[in-house]
């Protein structure tokens, strides 16, 4: 029987809901790096896979990846983000362009809504996510539990440890006036050590874009 996890939505959820429309309107900062991330992610997904996405934002990536798999549950703890994602999915359905098997839900990794049933997910994907999570170790442990044996955790994480001296005071000041969410300052080594400690074998890494965004594919041991 799967362990039952319960937890209130993280404190950053309100921040991300408030900025959702501004976030949705912003262009992708580095299109080449984004396309590379999609390319490498698709290389690890199969047509019969069941996939969970964490921190899906307004659903752009989910809409691009879901057509390559059997089922795709895209989640975010910010209801404002999911509201926009569902509108995109509805528009796509009306235009007969929506991927089959794609669903959106307001949930975090500890929610009962992401329970996969007895078999587990083939893959959990999370892009620009883990450095914004307050309970990173618990999150990775839960991801490990949600995956079937040999399942993949595919992620990209901003790692700004080398620039923490510059960015940490600024982020702290912005947090005091509600202008920034929680941010964790990781290095590549710190990130990968956390992933390994959660019971994964890292099978691929990349940096898209350089020098701070670390792409990692890890297999559940």
Image (spheres, grey):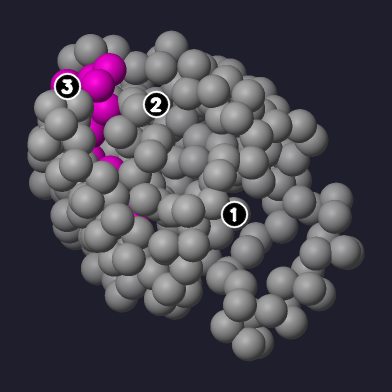
Q: Are marks 2 and 1 in contact (CB under 8 Å)?
A: no
Q: Is residue 197 above or below residue 49?
A: below
Read off the magenta span: 66-76
CA gap, disc 3 to disc 2?
16 Å
Q: Position of residue 183 (x, y in %)?
A: 63, 64
Q: Please name whichever residue, 104 or 120, is drawn nearer the observer in this view of the structure.
A: 104
Local packing at callout 3 (Cα closer than 10 Å; few below 14, some 14-19, many 20+) is: some
Q: Earlier in the sequence, mark 2 or mark 1?
A: 1
Q: Which residue is mark 2?
A: 152
Query: Where does label 1 land, which residue?
Result: 131
- Ranked by sequence position, the earlier of labels 1 and 3 is 3
Residue at image coords 39%, 69%? 17
Query: What residue is at 28 percent from the left and 50 percent from the top?
Result: 85
For residue 73: magenta? yes
The image position of residue 151, as x and y in percent, is 34, 25
Q: Give the residue at the far front of this rendering.
A: 95
Label 1 environment density (alpha carbons within 10 Å; few <14, some 14–19, many ≥20): many
Q: Residue 23: percent from the left, percent from the top? A: 49, 57
Residue drawn 41% across the image and 17% down it: 42
What secondary structure is found at the residue carrying circle 3? loop
- Residue 148: quarter of image: top left
Disc 1 secondary structure class: helix
Image height of 188 relative to 87, above or below? above
Q: Residue at x 85, y 50 (%)?
A: 162
- Precedes in sequence: disc 3 or disc 2: 3
* Left or right placement of residue 141 versus residue 218 in this view: left
Q: Secondary structure at mark 2?
A: strand
């Amino acid at each position: 029987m799967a362990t039952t996890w319960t937890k209130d939505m993280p404190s950053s959820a309100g921040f991300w809901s408030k900025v959702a429309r501004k976030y949705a309107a912003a262009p992708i900062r580095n299109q080449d790096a984004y396309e590379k991330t999609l390319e490498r992610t698709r290389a690890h997904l199969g047509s019969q896979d069941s996939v969970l996405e964490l921190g899906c934002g307004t659903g752009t990536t989910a809409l691009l990846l879901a057509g390559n798999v059997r089922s795709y549950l895209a989640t975010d703890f910010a209801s404002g983000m999911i509201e926009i994602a569902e509108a995109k999915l509805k528009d796509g359905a009306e235009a007969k362009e929506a991927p089959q098997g794609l669903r959106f839900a307001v949930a975090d990794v500890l929610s009962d809504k992401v329970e996969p049933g007895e078999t587990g997910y083939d893959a959990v994907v999370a892009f620009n996510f883990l450095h914004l999570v307050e309970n990173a170790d618990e999150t990775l442990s839960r991801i490990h539990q949600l995956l079937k044996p040999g399942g993949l955790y595919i992620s990209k994480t901003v790692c700004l440890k080398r620039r923490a001296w510059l960015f940490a005071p600024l982020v702290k000041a912005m947090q005091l006036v509600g202008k920034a969410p929680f941010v964790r300052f990781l290095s590549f080594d710190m990130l990968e050590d956390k992933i390994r400690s959660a019971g994964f074998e890292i099978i691929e890494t990349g940096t898209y874009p350089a020098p701070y965004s670390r792409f990692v594919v890890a297999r559940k041991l």
